[in-house]
Image: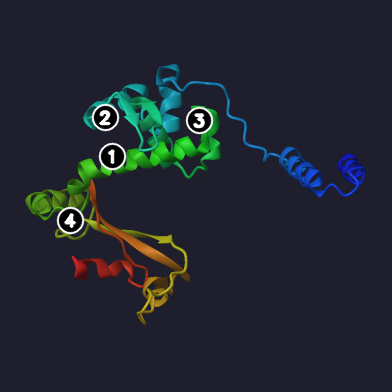
Amino acid sequence: MEEILLLLLSREGNYEDAADVIVHALLFDTVQPERPIIPDLRFCLWEHSNADSELLFRFDVSGVLALCRHFGLPEIMITDQRDKAHCSEALCILLYRLSYPKRLYDMIKVFGRSTGQISRLFRHMVLYIYDRYKDLIYFQHRICSERIHMYAAAIRGKGSTMSNVFGFIDGTKNAVCRPSSRRGTKENLQRQVYSGHKRVHCLNYQAVVTPDVIWLRHPITGNHRTPALPTQQ
C-alpha cells in the first residue's frame, strides 16, 4: 500500500489516473476469505465394513441398500440446485446426520463435499421421503383401532398392572427464534409459543409410542403441555 501512495504522489494532480490506481489497489489487495479444506475423496458405501456402517448410519451395508430399494430411490439423486449423488450416498448423508447431532462441517471428511452440497442433499432427501410417506407418518386411527387389543396385550405381557394401556405419550420441544406478530394484527405469538416449563420459545412435537411403531402428530405451540395431546386428537 505504501508503494501505491508514492505512485499517487508522483502523478502531480492527475486524478483520473489516481482513481484507476485506487480501484486496482482495492481489487487486488482484497484478502480472500479462507475456506474449509475439502478432502479429495469419493464416498463409497462398499468401502465401509458392516461394523463401521452400523456405527455411522445405524444400518449395516446391506441394510442401507435395502432402504434404497424400499424407498424407491432413483439411482442418481439430483437436487434443485443440480447437485448429484448416488442414492446410497444421499441416503447415507441423511442417516449420518440423523444418527447423532452433527455439524455440516463434521460431515466434510466423510463425504468429501462442501457444507452447501451436504445441506442441499440432506434437505432433498428429507423432502423426498416425506412427500412419499407423509400419509403414513401421522396417527392412523384405522390401524390403531385394528391393533389396539394386541398393543394392550403386549404391554400387559411386559408386566403392566393395567390391561387397557395401548401406548405411551411422549414429546419433545424444539426451540425456535422469538416470533414477532404479523403485520396489522395484535396477536401475541410470543405467548403462544413460549413454554413456561422449559423457559424457551418452542414448538412441541408430540407422539404416541406403541409396541410396534411411533405415531407422530403435527407440531403444536410450545405453551401446550404433553398431557394435552389426548384432548386434541
Image side of residue 47 versus residue 25, left or right:
left
**Mark 3: amino acid:** Arg
The answer to which of marks 1 and 3 sits earlier in the sequence is 3
**Relative height, residue 195 to residue 93 (above, below):** below
Q: Nearer the viewer, residue 58 or 133?
A: 133
Gap in Å between the C-alphas at discs 4 and 1? 32 Å
Gap in Å between the C-alphas at discs 1 and 3? 20 Å
The answer to which of marks 2 and 1 sits earlier in the sequence is 2
Which residue is depicted at the point 48% across and 21% down? 42
The answer to which of marks 4 and 3 sits earlier in the sequence is 3
Q: Can you tell which quarter of the image residue 129 is in? A: top left
The local crowd at label 1, few if under 14, some if 14 to 19, many if 20 or more residues have their Cα within 10 Å, is some
Q: Residue furthest bottom?
A: 186
**CB under 8 Å between discs 2 and 1:** yes
Name the residue tied to disc 3: 113
Gap in Å between the C-alphas at discs 4 and 2? 34 Å
Name the residue tied to disc 2: 73
Gap in Å between the C-alphas at discs 2 and 1? 9 Å
**Mark 4: amino acid:** Phe
